[in-house]
Amino acid sequence: MTSLLPLLAQAAPPAGGGLGMFVPMILIMVMFYFILIRPQRKAQKAQEEMRKNVRVGDKVVTIGGIHGMVSGVTDKTVSIKVADALSLKFDRAAVATVESKSKADEPDTKVIES
């Protein structure tokens, strides 16, 4: 009977071992949120806002690399003028970047000489 006591003491789990294993895992998940997930969501919201604010006259680049000027806008599509007599219709999600805003959106910057 005396030889069983050391074996039973070794088989017992250490106190607080269950919670101690989850703390590093929780810290890793929090780090992933702040390093990967949060910045990705922020960039995605900025991209959606940029696509929502596309106006006629903006110079844009599509995800396919086509450069042109916006000639028409609907709720779901954007017409892009790529040549004098050529206008292509794209889904709004196909707009990758807006290179420059139209002249109506830019503030007046006049140089006043004295």
Image: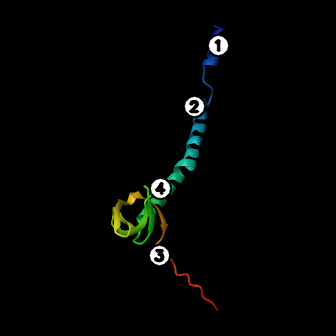
Q: Residue furthest front?
A: 84
Along the viewing direction, whichever of 72 and 67 lies nearer the viewer: 67
Say the numbered circle drawn on residue 44.
4
* Distance of label 4 from label 2 (alpha carbons): 38 Å
44 and 95: which is toward the camera: 95
Mark 4 Cα within 10 Å, few/some/many (few <14, many 20+)? few
Report the amino acid beneath label 1. Leu
Q: Tell me the quarter of the image containing the C terminus.
A: bottom right
Instruction: Kindly state the secondary structure of the residue where label 4 is placed.
Output: helix
The amino acid sitting under disc 3 is Asp
Marker disc for residue 93: none
User: Amino acid under label 4?
Assistant: Gln
Q: CA distance from mark 3 to mark 2?
A: 59 Å
Residue highlighted by disc 1: 5
| Residue depth check, mark 3 versus mark 2: number of the one nearer the observer | 3
**Residue occupying image coordinates x 42% and y 62%:** 51
Q: Along the horizontal axis of the image, is 92 left or right of 10?
A: left
In the displayed structure, 11 sits above or below 50; it is: above
